[in-house]
Image (cartoon, grey):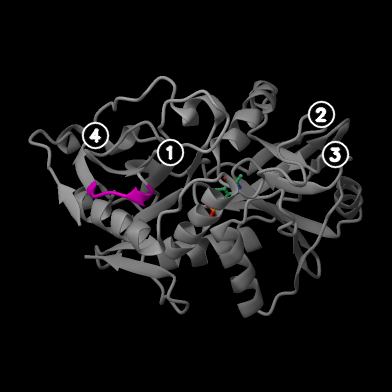
Amino acid sequence: MITIKKTTSSRLSSLDSMTIEFGNVFSDHYYRQKWSNGKWHEANIAPLTDILINPAALGLHYGQAVFEGLKAYRGTHDNRIRLFRPDKNAIRLRNSCERLCIPAVSIDNFLEAIVTLVSVEHQWVPKSRLQTLYLRPLLFASEGHLSVRPANSYEFLVLAAPVSEYFDRSGPGIRLKAEDRFTRAAPGGMGAAKTGGNYASTLRPTGDSLKQGFDQVLWLDSYEHNYVEEAGQMNIFLRFKDRVVTPPLSGTILPGVTRECVLTLLDEWGLRREERRVSMEEIAEAIEKKYLLEAFGAGTAAVIAPVKTISYRSANIEFPDLGRETLAQRLYDELTGIQYGEIPDRHQWTVVVE
Ligand SMILES: *Cc1c(COP(=O)(O)O)cnc(C)c1O
């Protein structure tokens, strides 16, 4: 049961779709549910406001918090609202909770929260083919205490934000800086959990890279800073002449939903693909020999983002200009086609919200 209290002063009419970026605007309502005494309590959907928080909340001090990210799409032809594989986000949130000793939200509870919030906010799902309603589930330790231990109370929130695509699609592709000093995640760490701590550690190196004119950091392995891991909030793919390669889910990278969809589509299209480690040397050499054709990032926020260059130590690796005839474009068209209800959903990836 979710208690719904609607706003009497919606901000929707003052929303200018031209000014929507990624995460600068939020919808009218949010979802909130508390955990204490060993169980999840009744949930509310209410007008979005600041919330009271205990200044000793364990989530603030020791980072016991996890999140998710998924989108609601408005059908291009049928105007129906679709979610894309929300069950995958529910399962990943559960796995992230497990890693950080947070009581998990059940799959059904998660899906009910998402579906109900989207149906309350249906008018906030943008009409543009380049915009969506992004959903941000967040779970954090709210108990005020200073001991380093799992908390006895938690909050599960879901925010909704109309967003534009993360990277400008009209450009030639993104410029990545392969990071050879800092590390995002090490074996045995939290790299496979979607938790804020993994992002906090990237702010400094990412900021430095942006200042140097790059769009994003390409993370490398923590021992040698040589093997490719992932790019910002995207998993990375490389298309060699005869196969597509992506790093394996070794525990240091995030198991992306988009990544899994890409692998499924490659299998379906009969393209050879491998999950294996790729070194920077292999990339530089294959570019030189014209054996490596494309690289692209894959993630919910950026969808499929083609890579133009990778800078590594003193080398500048330039990908060839293949025009629009790229695997990245084909994947982008296929994924967004399914998400916006333009092509048949053969895999039952979408969930329609009435
Ligand atoms: C969320 C995320 C991704 C992409 O996952 P999707 O499920 O495809 O959105 C990739 N890398 C990191 C670090 C992430 O947090």
- The residue that label 2 is drawn on is 181
Can you give x and y, in whole percent of width and height, for residue 298 in the image? Answer: 60, 53
Residue type, numbered disc 3 = His
Query: Where does label 4 land, which residue?
Result: 48
Residue marked by disc 1: 152
Q: Specify the amino acid type for callout 1.
A: Asn
Q: Residues within 10 Å of mark 2 (few under 14, many from 20)?
A: few
User: Depth-wise, is mark 4 or mark 1 nearer the camera?
Assistant: 1
Which of the two residues, 210 or 279, is positioned nearer the viewer here?
Answer: 279
Mark-to-mark CA distance, 3 and 1: 39 Å
In the rendered view, tell whether residue 264 sits above or below residue 87: below
Residue beneath disc 3: 225
Whether residue 326 is visible, yes or no, is no
Q: Which secondary structure, mark 3?
A: loop
- Name the front one of labels 4 and 2: 4
Query: How far is disc 3 from disc 2 in space, using C-alphas?
Result: 7 Å
Q: Is mark 1 within 8 Å of ligand 1?
A: no
User: Nearer the N terminus, badge 3 or badge 1?
Assistant: 1
Range of the magenta residues?
38-43
286 to the left or right of 266:
right
Quarter of the figure with the N terminus = bottom left
Q: Tell me how far mark 2 sits from mark 1, CA to CA.
A: 38 Å
In this view, the residue farthest toward the front is 37
> Would residue 232 be seen by someone viewing this image from the given angle?
yes
Residue located 46% across and 49% down the image: 103
